[in-house]
Image (cartoon, helix red, strand yellow):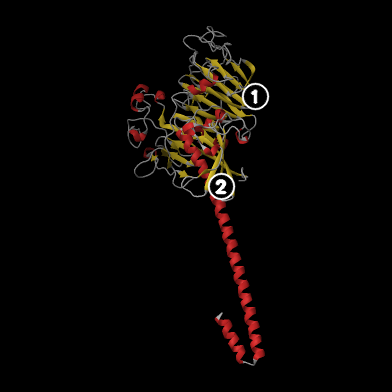
């Protein structure tokens, strides 16, 4: 305004009264212009503040939705049975058997907006879908966050940290003590059971590496090995040569300093390659369950309805591509609701579980006193063992012999061993919905019959085939609860090509699949990424494993106010 006055004074001194009038007009015009500019600037600033506030609320609403997920997960991990709660009146929960919590467990987030703890003017609410939890172990949670008038909704899949989160999981990075052979190993199986069993390296186990002549027999990751998927070990693992870890690697070994893996200098230098900087990173142990008893419950009519299929004693299963299976089970009889029958076209059970039990000391309702097709002196017509095979089978053990093409979702569990006798694939391919779980209390193993002639072992043709089991393809999630995934007679006979696994492998002890250049297989293991968000029916979970998000998606807001 001082500038305007000066302009008026200069104009006034240039002439008479007419010039004064002109000066006034100029002053008013300039004042009006400045006022309009000030109003426009103020309006722009206000609009910018509104936009900024709206943007802040938009971002804060997402944070509130994520806070809702964290709040629900904390409740779920504090109470393993909390998945039973939800709002049965909400359409998102249709198909779920949920109830609103009452009493001390009241949770207002199931039915309305709830203040996000510690944050002003931020709210969340969530809806739960547990319709697939009992079969896949997955809970879907839809969480909405609100700040001001802005609402955002996300959906997450929650599952326990699981064995099938990894292509390769091992509890103990050593040879199974039951498989020790003295003097090839430092100990007999009985000695290994004392010095090596149930003990991680960082818990004081002495390993025969780096010049130590007497100790437990560990298994290295060797030169040329490539792990094409996520891996976790509860133990400290050894590398020997140039190993490639193509995905994330975690271990429960956390030394005070140095790497979270050990180089076995007894076999030279090692330069492992890790896909992620900082790997291997630390993660808590995944605790093995003591047995697969919880799967056994899924074929018990007093526990679940409808039950799966219960078979007794050695049982052969050939998976058909039309949602059926061919079953031979000489010890099994029709004893009730869990009897699914035998023959060429047995439907896959509704709940997706087949369990094969040992022959009980006292015959139960599902066990015949005299097995079909003979006695323990022969193979019962199953074809195992074949003539000349050095491998022995106990004719009363709950062993499964399995192969074929699966259509559907199925978990096959054995009280004893599972032997993969030929290729196992999916009818829908790797991108379909077929999923197979193989869970044995003892070994899951690749069938490899061999014969001994004049001190020389040679491969035998596989039962029902005209060749040995070369270059097998196995699509499955595999779990050996007490022992290992391995190849029968891995150190005998000639090389068999490449063992191709598409799925996941979890085991208590490291199993051996071959000695490269001498016998057995070279490994080609690839993770089935569908296992990140799907699971074979009733597949075993670790003991006391926490829930966490496995898949995150933003949705159209589920609520308008």
Q: Is residue 212 left or right of residue 110?
A: left
Q: Is residue 386 above or below residue 32?
A: above
Q: Are marks 2 and 1 in contact (CB under 8 Å)?
A: no
Q: In terms of image quadrants, where is residue 372? A: top right
The foreground one among 313 and 296 is: 296
Element class at badge 2: strand
Question: In front: 62, or 85?
Answer: 85
Percent position (x, y) of residue 532?
54, 37
> Dot 1 lies on which element?
loop
Residue 191 in view of the camera:
yes
Q: Is residue 386 visible?
A: no
In this figure, which residue is indicated by the disc labeled 2? 146
Residue lying at 46% horizontally and 35% vertically, measured from the top left: 77
**In what quadrant of the picture does the N terminus appear?**
bottom right
Neighbours of disc 1 within 10 Å: few (<14), some (14-19), many (20+): some
Q: Position of residue 203 (x, y in %)?
A: 34, 33
**Tag 1 residue:** 323
Q: Residue at x 38, y 28 (%)?
A: 198
Left or right: where 153 falls relative to 183: right
Give the mark toward the camera: 2 or 1: 2
| Rendered view: 119 above or below 266 | below
Residue 207 image offset from top left, x and y in percent: 35, 33
Compare residues 189 and 132 and report the one nearer the observer. 132
Q: Nearer the viewer, residue 382 or 329?
A: 329
């Amino acid at each position: 305004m001082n500038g305007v006055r000066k302009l008026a004074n200069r104009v006034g001194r240039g002439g008479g009264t007419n010039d004064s009038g002109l000066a006034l007009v100029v002053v008013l015009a300039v004042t009006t212009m400045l006022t309009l500019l000030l109003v426009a600037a103020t309006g722009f600033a206000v609009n910018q503040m509104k936009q900024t506030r709206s943007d802040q609320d938009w971002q804060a609403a997402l944070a509130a939705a994520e806070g809702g997920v964290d709040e629900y997960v904390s409740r779920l991990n504090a109470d393993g049975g909390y998945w039973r709660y939800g709002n049965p009146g909400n359409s998102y929960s249709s198909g779920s058997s949920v109830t609103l919590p009452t009493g001390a467990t009241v949770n207002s987030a199931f039915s309305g907006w709830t203040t996000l703890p510690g944050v002003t003017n931020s709210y969340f609410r969530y809806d739960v879908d547990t319709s697939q939890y009992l079969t896949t172990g997955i809970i879907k949670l839809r969480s909405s966050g609100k700040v001001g008038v802005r609402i955002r909704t996300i959906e997450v899949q929650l599952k326990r940290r699981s064995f099938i989160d990894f292509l390769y999981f091992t509890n103990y990075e050593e040879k199974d003590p039951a498989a020790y052979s003295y003097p090839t190993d430092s100990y007999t199986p009985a000695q290994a059971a004392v010095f090596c069993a149930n003990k991680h390296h960082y818990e004081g186990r002495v390993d025969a590496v780096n010049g130590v002549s007497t100790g437990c027999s560990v298994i290295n990751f060797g030169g040329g090995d490539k792990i094409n998927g996520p891996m976790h070990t509860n133990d400290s693992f050894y590398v020997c040569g140039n190993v490639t870890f193509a995905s994330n690697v975690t271990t429960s070994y956390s030394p005070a300093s140095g790497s979270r893996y050990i180089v076995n200098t007894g076999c030279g230098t090692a330069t492992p390659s890790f896909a992620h900087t900082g790997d291997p990173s630390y993660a808590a142990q995944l605790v093995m369950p003591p047995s697969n008893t919880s799967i056994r419950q899924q074929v018990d009519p007093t526990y679940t309805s409808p039950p799966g299929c219960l078979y007794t004693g050695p049982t052969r299963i050939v998976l058909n591509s039309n949602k059926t299976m061919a079953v031979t089970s000489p010890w099994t009889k029709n004893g009730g609701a869990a009897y699914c029958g035998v023959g060429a076209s047995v439907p896959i059970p509704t709940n997706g579980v087949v369990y094969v039990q040992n022959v009980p000391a006292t015959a139960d309702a599902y066990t015949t006193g005299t097995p079909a097709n003979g006695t323990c002196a022969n193979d019962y017509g199953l074809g195992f063992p074949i003539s000349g095979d050095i491998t022995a089978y106990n004719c009363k053990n709950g062993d499964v012999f399995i192969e074929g093409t699966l259509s559907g979702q199925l978990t096959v569990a054995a009280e004893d061993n599972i032997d993969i006798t030929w290729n196992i694939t999916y009818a829908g391919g790797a991108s379909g919905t077929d999923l197979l779980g193989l869970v044995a209390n003892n070994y899951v193993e690749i069938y490899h019959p061999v014969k001994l002639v004049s001190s020389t072992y040679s491969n035998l043709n596989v039962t029902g085939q005209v060749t040995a089991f070369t270059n097998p393809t196995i699509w499955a999630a595999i779990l050996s609860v007490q022992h290992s995934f391995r190849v029968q007679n891995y150190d005998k006979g000639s090389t068999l090509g490449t063992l191709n696994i598409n799925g996941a492998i979890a085991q208590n002890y490291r199993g051996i699949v071959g000695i490269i250049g001498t016998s057995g297989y070279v490994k080609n293991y690839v993770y089935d990424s569908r296992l990140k968000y799907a699971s074979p029916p009733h597949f075993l979970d670790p003991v006391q494993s926490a829930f966490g998000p496995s898949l995150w998606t933003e949705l159209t807001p589920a609520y308008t106010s």
